[in-house]
C-alpha cells in the first residue's frame, strides 16, 4: 500500500518553492552569462532594471572582464512590452547546485526469492552537483500590435546525494532471519540527474541503501542498487 508521506513532503516542497523566490534559479538575475546575441558565443553581462534588461558586451583584460561599449553596441530589452519586433535571444550560465531532494518512489530489483519492489517510504537527502541553466527571451505580437515579452527557463544538473530515510524490514526481506516487522533507518547514497523547469525540479537517481541497525547483515537490500524518481528544491 502506498504511503502518503512522500506526497505530503512533495506538496510541502512545492509550497516552499512558490513562497520563497530567493531560493529559485528560474529568474534571470544580474550577472555573467554566455550568449550568441552578436552571432558568436561570448560572455556578456546582464543588468536587470525596473523597465529594461541591459545586455553589455565584455572584453577580457588579464583575469578580469570589462564592459566594452566603446567599440561594440549594447542591447536593451523591455521587461514587459515593446512597440517594435525584437529577435529571440538565449542565455546560459553554469554553477554548482545544492538541493534538498526526496525520492518518493524507489524501484528495487529482484533479489534472492523476492520479486521487484516499489518503495514509497519517507526520505530526504542533500544533493550537490554541477548545473547549467538555459534562459530564452522572445516577444510575441498581440492584437494591439504590441510585442509582449515571453521567457522560458530550464536547467540541467548532475551530481551526488546523501541522506536518510526509512525502509521496511520484515521476515520476507531478511530471508526469515527475523520475526518482527518494522521500518528501519537507512542511509542512502547515489547519483542523480535532474531537469528543472521554472519552479519544478524532477530527475532520476541510481542509489543504494544501508540499514543502520543490528539486522543490516540479513537485510536483502543492503547496499543493493535501486532506481528512483527525484523531486528537489534548490537552496543555494
Image (cartoon, rainbow, N blue to C red):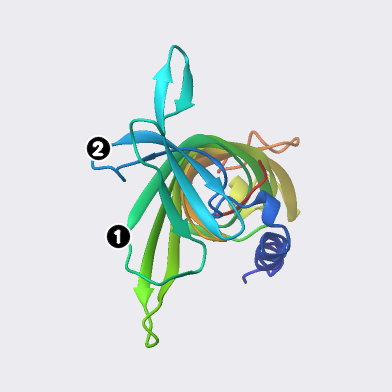
Q: Residue furthest left?
A: 39
52 displayed left or right of 163: left
Task: For marks 2 and 1, give the CA distance.
Answer: 15 Å
Residue wearing tag 2: 40
Secondary element at image label 1: loop
Q: Residue furthest bottom?
A: 143
Give the vertical position of 178 relative to 20 (above or below). above
Q: Where is residue 209 in the image (x, y as percent from the top left)?
A: 59, 40
Q: Residue furthest front?
A: 70
Residue wearing tag 1: 87
Q: How crowded is mark 2: few (under 14 residues within 10 Å), some or many (20 or more)?
A: few
Mark on residue 53?
none
Residue at position x 33%, y 62% in the image: 86
Task: Please indicate, yes or no, whether residue 150 appears anywhere in the rendered image.
Answer: yes
Secondary element at image label 2: loop
Q: Residues within 10 Å of mark 1 (few under 14, many from 20)?
A: few
Residue in the foreground of this view, choosing between 208 and 36: 36
Q: What is the quadrant of residue 62 in the picture? A: top left
Q: Position of residue 167 (x, y in %)?
A: 66, 51
Residue at position x 62%, y 58% in the image: 50
Q: Where is residue 133 in the image (x, y as percent from the top left)?
A: 45, 46
Amino acid at each position: 500500500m502506498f504511503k502518503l508521506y512522500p506526497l505530503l513532503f512533495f506538496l510541502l516542497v512545492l509550497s516552499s518553492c512558490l513562497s520563497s523566490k530567493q531560493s529559485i534559479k528560474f529568474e534571470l538575475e544580474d550577472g555573467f552569462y554566455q550568449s550568441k546575441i552578436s552571432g558568436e558565443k561570448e560572455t556578456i553581462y546582464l543588468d536587470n532594471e525596473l523597465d529594461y534588461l541591459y545586455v553589455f558586451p565584455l572584453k577580457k583584460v588579464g583575469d578580469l572582464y570589462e564592459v566594452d561599449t566603446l567599440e561594440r553596441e549594447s542591447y536593451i530589452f523591455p521587461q514587459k512590452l515593446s512597440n517594435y519586433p525584437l529577435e529571440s535571444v538565449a542565455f546560459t550560465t553554469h554553477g554548482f547546485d545544492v538541493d534538498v531532494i526526496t525520492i518518493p518512489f524507489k524501484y528495487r530489483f529482484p533479489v534472492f526469492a523476492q520479486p521487484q519492489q516499489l518503495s514509497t517510504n519517507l526520505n530526504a537527502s542533500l544533493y550537490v552537483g554541477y548545473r547549467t541553466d538555459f534562459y530564452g527571451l522572445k516577444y510575441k505580437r498581440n492584437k494591439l500590435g504590441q510585442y509582449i515579452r515571453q521567457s522560458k527557463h530550464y536547467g540541467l544538473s548532475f551530481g551526488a546525494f546523501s541522506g536518510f530515510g526509512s525502509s521496511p524490514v520484515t521476515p520476507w526481506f531478511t530471508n526469515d532471519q527475523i520475526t518482527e516487522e518494522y521500518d528501519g533507518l537507512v542511509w542512502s547514497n547515489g547519483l542523480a540527474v535532474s531537469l528543472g523547469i521554472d519552479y519544478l525540479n524532477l530527475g532520476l537517481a541510481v542509489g543504494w541503501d544501508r540499514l543502520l541497525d543490528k539486522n543490516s547483515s540479513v537485510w536483502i537490500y543492503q547496499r543493493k542498487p535501486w532506481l528512483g524518481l527525484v523531486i528537489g528544491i534548490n537552496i543555494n
